[in-house]
Image (cartoon, grey):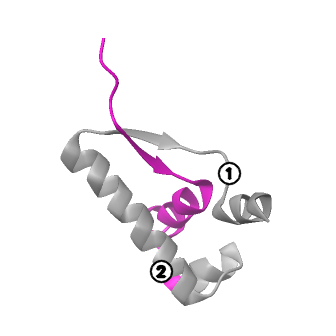
């Protein structure tokens, strides 16, 4: 059996997809819900969408990490 390559989304990226694409919120409103600026929300969403597209186009498995990017930054310090 072979192992698929993975496209990995963290919880912030999943939340951004949920708020923007599933709930249909504007970036400003979604950023407030995530306690980030509109610009930061846009970057998170763009990264998430790129990873989703990569998984779909290239037949990769989609893996969702249980940590957020904020938690990862805190663990690195």
The residue labelled by disc 2 is 42
Query: Which residue reaches farthest left?
Result: 57
Residue 71, x across and y down, in percent: 74, 59
Image height of 1 relative to 73, above or below: above
Residue 27, labelled with which disc? none
Whichever of labels 1 and 2 marks the residue nearer the N terminus, that label is: 2
- Side (left or right) of 7 relative to 11: left
Q: Is residue 19 magenta?
A: yes
- Residue at image point 47% right, 78% down: 43
- Residue at image point 57% right, 61% down: 15
The residue labelled by disc 1 is 67
Residue 57, x across and y down, in percent: 20, 49
Measure the C-alpha gap from mark 1 to mark 2.
19 Å
Residue 69: which quarter of the image? Answer: bottom right
- Residue at image point 59% right, 83% down: 29
- Label 1's element? loop
- Residue at image point 25% right, 47% down: 56
Characterize the local packing of mark 2: few (<14), some (14-19) or many (20 or more) Cα atoms within 10 angstroms.
some
Image height of 76 relative to 44, above or below: above
Residue 12: which quarter of the image? Answer: bottom right
Write the start and end of the magenta stretch as one range: 1-27
Residue 33, x across and y down, in percent: 68, 75
Image height of 65 relative to 21, above or below: above
- Label 2's element? helix
């Amino acid at each position: 059996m072979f192992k698929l390559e993975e496209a990995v989304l963290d919880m912030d990226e999943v939340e951004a997809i949920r708020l923007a694409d599933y709930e249909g919120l504007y970036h400003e409103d979604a950023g407030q819900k995530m306690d980030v600026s509109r610009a930061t929300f846009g970057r998170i969403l763009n990264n998430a969408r790129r990873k989703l597209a990569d998984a779909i186009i290239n037949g990769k498995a989609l893996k969702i990490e249980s940590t957020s990017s904020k938690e990862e930054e805190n663990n690195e310090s």
